[in-house]
């Protein structure tokens, strides 16, 4: 946000409303410059609620309600923090520093009540304006703390965070080579990652960034190709049914230490997230765990973390999504703070970064009623409705095992079936279902074959129907069609 962006790359996330005025290129350019200035102001005065509030307003005008909500929420939180400080009884000798970056102890100059009251009133006013922006960015139906939006790539995203680099591809192939399944009797890896997984472009679309997994050698039917255990996962709470055989309830996760991991530090107890998140706990926990990985691995910018950089997002033009104050703002920001991140001063974890990560995770994670996981190698496989590899989830809900469905040749692309319950369904049903993971219609060879067949049958039908129609409806040249308007009905008195 602190660098200018190309007007042509601007795609609002707000769902259009009737009566919306179009923003001209000039409007977008000047709002973009305003955004840039306000971001720089936030960098300089990270604890001043007014800087966050001003940027929230600009983001709202630029039609990014989810980002405006994020900034307004931070402005509110800062006002609350400063107001609490004013209320804690030590206010007499404390002064709120310039642009509110700090509180100063000034024992020689006690503040008078009037000054404190003025400051308090200012903060209360600011908080109420921030709250107003928050409210305007939510929809009140069906849930008053949610808003609707369309996921889009933000125009200011840095070039290096847009595409996967060759170095990253090498790293991914190395991860496949290091996978435990490769070391049983043959040291050669089973798989490599390659670009142009759906062929070279014939429609102008750049397929360089479409990755896929390919057989690095001949593989026998039934052979295990990959055992992919993830560290980025989340599980749902214990569920509501009280069942004494499962101390954690009837349907949820029954593991006593979950959602913590055996290797987690004692101070990283994540159960509070699960308890607060309710029925969406697994996804929220997965997102928080991913943030935790960035912090534990000391990666400066989360979009540089190889676990995140490898993921391709999906931005379906027409799909409406929901953002939630609790799941997308309050809980991730509280988690970041508990993990030691200053969410006001560290801009690498800004709201747009969290939404960018989310768009990638959604397109690459998989789950069951108990858990939601992001498996770092499995997520690179493309889908086919006639897969050549099969996958199963282990009992821990976090490990995916992949094996060959038939003999595979070196160089063949390996395809899994994303939804195993779809294979018996007709083309249209399968494609509709697959839309949630693919940006467009499924391009697998079975779909292409069936589509061709359907087109052929349609053409055949059209040709035979038009023959019949010609016979039945053809009007001889000499016959004149009598239209109702041509009929004169004699009227008698
Ligand atoms: C889980 S990722 C698979 C790896 C991905 N190709 C990549 O470049 O990172 C899923 C994405 O791959 C693409 N994809 C996978 N299978 C596909 C298929 N059968 N038809 C069209 N696109 C597919 C879609 O863009 C989808 O959103």
Image: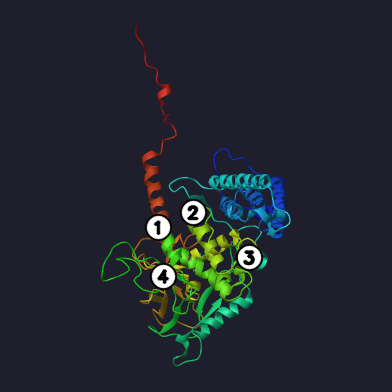
Q: Nearer the viewer, residue 158 or 235?
A: 235
Query: Where is mark 3, residue-wise?
Result: 348
Q: Nearer the viewer, mark 2 or mark 4?
A: 2
- Mark 2 residue crowding within 10 angstroms, few (<14) / some (14–19) / many (20+): few
Query: Secondary structure under badge 1?
Result: helix
- In this rendering, does residue 233 appear at all? yes
| Residue 407 location, quadrant | bottom left
Q: Nearer the viewer, mark 4 or mark 3?
A: 3
Looking at the image, the residue that sits furthest to the bottom is: 185
State the separation of the CA atoms marked 3 and 2: 24 Å
Disc number for residue 53: none
Q: CB of mark 2 within 8 Å of CB of mark 1?
A: no
Mark sitting earlier along the chain (4/1): 4
Tell me if 359 is positioned left or right of 224 in this view.
Answer: right
- Mark 3 residue crowding within 10 angstroms, few (<14) / some (14–19) / many (20+): some
Residue 421 screen position, x and y as percent: 35, 66
Tell me if 215 is positioned left or right of 251 in this view.
Answer: right
At 28% from the left and 64% from the top, the residue drawn is: 242
Query: Where is mark 4, residue-wise?
Result: 417
- In this rendering, does residue 5 appear at all? no
- Mark 4 residue crowding within 10 angstroms, few (<14) / some (14–19) / many (20+): many
State the separation of the CA atoms marked 2 and 1: 23 Å
Disc number for residue 428: 1
State the separation of the CA atoms marked 2 and 4: 25 Å
At 72% from the left and 48% from the top, the residue drawn is: 30
Disc number for residue 321: 2
Mark sitting earlier along the chain (2/4): 2
State the separation of the CA atoms marked 4 and 1: 16 Å
């Amino acid at each position: 946000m602190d660098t200018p962006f190309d007007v042509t790359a601007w795609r609002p996330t707000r769902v259009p409303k009737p009566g919306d005025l179009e923003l001209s290129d000039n409007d977008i350019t000047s709002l973009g410059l305003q955004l840039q200035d306000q971001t720089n102001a936030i960098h300089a005065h990270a604890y001043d609620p007014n800087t966050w509030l001003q940027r929230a307003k600009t983001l709202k005008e630029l039609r990014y309600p989810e980002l405006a909500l994020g900034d307004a929420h931070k402005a509110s939180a800062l006002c609350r923090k400063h107001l609490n400080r004013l209320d804690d009884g030590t206010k007499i000798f404390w002064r709120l520093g310039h642009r509110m970056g700090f509180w100063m102890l000034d024992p020689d100059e006690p503040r008078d009540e009037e000054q404190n009251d003025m400051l308090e009133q200012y903060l209360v006013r600011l908080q109420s304006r921030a709250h107003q922006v928050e409210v305007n960015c939510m929809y009140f139906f069906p849930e008053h703390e949610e808003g609707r939006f369309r996921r889009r790539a933000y125009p200011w995203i840095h070039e290096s965070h847009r595409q996967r680099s060759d170095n990253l591809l090498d790293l991914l192939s190395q991860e496949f080579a290091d996978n435990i399944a490769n070391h049983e009797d043959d040291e050669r890896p089973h798989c490599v990652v390659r670009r142009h997984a759906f062929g070279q472009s014939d429609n102008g679309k750049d397929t360089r960034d479409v990755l896929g997994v390919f057989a690095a050698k001949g593989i026998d039917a039934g052979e295990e190709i990959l055992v992919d255990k993830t560290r980025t996962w989340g599980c749902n709470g214990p569920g509501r049914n009280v069942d004494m055989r499962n101390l954690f309830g009837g349907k949820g996760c029954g593991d006593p230490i979950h959602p913590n991991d055996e290797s987690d530090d004692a101070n990283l107890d994540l159960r509070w997230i699960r308890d607060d998140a309710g029925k969406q706990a697994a996804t929220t926990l997965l997102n928080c765990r991913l943030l935790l990985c960035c912090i534990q691995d000391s990666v400066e910018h989360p979009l540089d973390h190889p676990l995140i950089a490898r993921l391709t997002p999906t931005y379906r033009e027409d799909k409406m999504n929901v953002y939630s104050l609790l799941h997308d703002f309050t809980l991730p920001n509280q988690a970041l703070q508990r993990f030691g991140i200053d969410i006001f001063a560290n801009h690498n974890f800004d709201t747009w970064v969290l939404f960018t990560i989310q768009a990638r995770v959604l397109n690459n994670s998989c789950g069951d009623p108990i858990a939601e996981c992001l498996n770092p190698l499995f997520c690179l496989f493309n889908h086919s409705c006639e897969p050549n590899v099969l996958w199963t989830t282990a009992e821990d809900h976090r490990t995916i095992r992949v094996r060959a469905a038939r003999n595979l040749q070196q160089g063949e692309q390996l395809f899994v079936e994303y939804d195993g319950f779809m294979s018996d369904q007709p083309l249209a049903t399968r494609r509709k279902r697959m839309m949630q993971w693919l940006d467009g219609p499924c391009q697998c060879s079975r779909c292409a074959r069936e589509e061709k067949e359907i087109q052929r049958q349609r053409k055949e039908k059209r040709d035979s129907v038009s023959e019949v129609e010609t016979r039945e409806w053809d009007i001889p040249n000499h016959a004149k069609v009598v239209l109702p308007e041509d009929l004169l009905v004699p009227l008698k008195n």
